[in-house]
Image (cartoon, coloured by chain):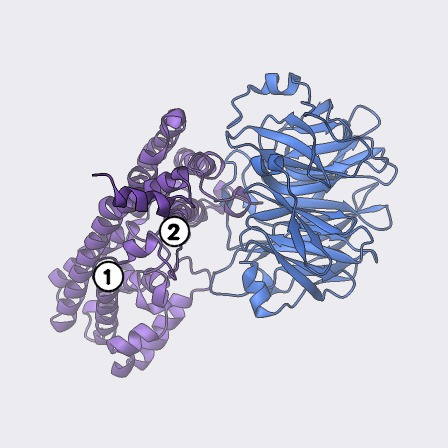
Amino acid sequence: MPGRRALLAALLSAPFGAEAQTASEAQRTAIRRAVAEHILPRHRAFAAAAQRFEQATAALDAGPDATKAEAARTAWIEAALAFQGVRSLRFGPMDAFDRGYRLAFFPDPRNVIGREMADLLRSDDPAALSPEAFARGRVGAQGLPAAERLLFGNDAQRLLASDGAARRRLLAAIGRNVGSIGVDLLDAWTQADPPYGRVLEGMQGGVFRDPQDGLVVLLKSLHGGLEFLAERQVARPLGASLREAAPPRAEAWRSGQSLAMVQAELAALAELWRSAFAPMLPPRAAALAREVATGFATAGSAAARIAPSLEVAVTQPQGRAAVEDLLRALGTLRRLLTERVAPALDLPVGFNSMDGD
Amino acid sequence: MRGSGIPRRAALALPAILLHRPARAGARAFLSAATDHAGAWRAAAFTLEGAPRFELPLPARGHGAALSPDGESAVVFARRPGRFALVLDPAEGRLRRTIVPATERWFCGHGAFSADGRTLYATEMDAAGEGLVGVYAAKGGFARIGEFPTGGADPHDIRLAADGQSLWVANGGIRSDPRVPRARLELEAIESSLVLLDAARGAVLARLRLPEEEGDLSLRHLALGAGGEVVVAMQHEGPRWETQRLVARADPDGVGSIDMADGVLRGLDHYTGSAAASLDGAMVAVTSPRGGRGVILDAATGRVRAGFALADGCGVAPSPSGFVVTSGLGGAALVQADGTQRDLEAAWLLRRRWDNHLLAL
């Protein structure tokens, strides 16, 4: 009998109106899709890669040889690429304890990383490398960019040298740190009570009051990720002209992984779009959905035309054209999100704050 | 062209849409670029009561606007890198003329009239991203009659100085390439400056910069106080963990950032987007859409008098009782000098998303 429960439900929903509640449920569903199809798999992948990196750096520290050094390099690349899958989600777990900065202190125009690493290597103090002290210590030396310098930088050979023990110890400390941040991030999304996906859906007294707040954060993450990708990861080495190209401003020029990282992040952002937002667009916005999908495809094919690497491409006219095409596509995507997607989804994301001047 | 769904030629050929029961011309009104929920760009004007005065389709996203001293012409500029500026009648919104930039020149979103109204100055950039002031004969069909360099990249806001003979121009200093719209290059090498240019010949009378430790600040938007001082609204492009001041004050002898309480500064979230002086020039309001907040300062001392809150609030213009502030989420608020505020109650205002700047007509 559709008696008391239906009546109760009607009474409860009455103050909000049926339409608002439907919208709210659609937003909750979108958050759950994003968590299940994007956020959780990406965090699992990063936690696993970070752990393999921790193991590889520990093995190199325990018994240095060329094979283990090569294994640590491979593990670094896998961890750095997996990090692209989660780096744009800069709220909640990634924001807590400065985890995002501790994993990747980038960009670093003042060479904070180099100075902090030099300090740590000079003192070679075991107390400073203990997991607790290291995690609370210098932020620049804690993450993947510092490890990249040790593994791929000019002095990478010294990792295996007789006087390289301090370098190996620092690398292992970074490995432990990255490994445990990977686990902590995953825990926040899976083991915490409540898991962060539930927080995103909104609750009384929570960081987010309702699903709309959580979905806004995801849209800002998508937009912010596209902006960071364009301005910090791609435009930085490009410079304003051929003469001003600066390959060492690419994020991972030492390992040669800058382009692969750009592509990995682009793929992750496209996945966030497909899981959370694309299914929410109403049928009347089908053209907009196609435009965004085309935007991601155009960005992907422009990135694929960048050869042989981001660092080399920015120094050649043809390569620069491909890099500029990528920037244009990323710019189009950002514009679509702020100017058309946010209003189409009725999300209060303003174009003044997202794309001001 | 994006978003509007109206082909550019058609958009420009359309007459201004006079809205139902248009407000009486002559009543105080405000002009801004805006969009509706379908994403169609327009210039729109409304009165202090929130009643619509006119709407005019724009070929693409607009930005700032300038009013001639006699109040007879308003010019709405495209957002940078912009390919149009529209001259319109501020009473009814009729399009009088479309200014197309010169070859290899792009509008940067702002302009200013000379004291006699005979000349329009527009910030522009060249293909290398270097700044120029384009000079137009306002009484001669807005023909482009000259240009002079601003001495920096990314020129943005421009104001006629108190002497009526020189121009303040903010060189934002963020490198960009007009052929790769909106991508900001070399964000870590900002070279921002505030220049005072001789309006007749373009000679640089003063070139002011913040100290090196504030090198991550981009000086972008300007308001002129009663004493001729310039209040500068800035953006911080450095690391998020740094806290930097976001408003500066300048006169021809120098520029210096204004200290504010930590809480106030945090509320502005590294970014201020617009500035406007009060009618008497004693106060300046600065908005931060990112923080959803704004502050009202004493123009003479830089002291913060009051704060206000409006989500995505950016456009700001003086009103008889204080300021009008518009929101990119729709709607507008009246803010008094002491920070008390109330929403402008008008459904139509809520149906438009108001872009960065608001001009009092």
Q: Colour of chain B?
A: blue
**Looking at the image, which is closer to me, A200 or B147?**
A200
Q: What amino acid is found at the position of numbered circle 2 in the picture?
A: Asp
Callout 2: residue from which chain?
A: A
Left or right position of A278 against B321:
left
Which residue position holds label 1?
A: A182
**What residue sits 30% from the left and 48% below the top?**
A261
Select label 2 or label 1 by which is in front: 2
| Residue at image coords 23%, 51% | A40
Give the letter of the chain under mark 1: A
SS of the residue at dot 1? Answer: helix
Q: Position of residue A287 (x, y in %)?
A: 39, 24
- Circle 1: residue type: Gly
Residue drawn at (52%, 36%) of the image = B181
- Percent of width and height locating residue B224: 77, 52
Q: Quadrant of residue A328?
A: top left
Q: How far apart are labels 2 and 1 at the CA level?
A: 28 Å
Is label 2 in a helix, a strand or a loop? Answer: loop
Residue B79 visible within the image: no
Residue tagged by mark 2?
A210
Which of the two residues, A56 or B337, is positioned nearer the viewer here? Answer: B337
Residue found at x 53% / y 52%: B290
Kindly indicate the quadrant of the structure image that contains residue B210: bottom right
Q: Position of residue B120 (x, y in %)?
A: 78, 35
- Rendered position, A135 above or below B51: below
B58 lies above or below A245: above
Q: Which chain is purple?
A: A
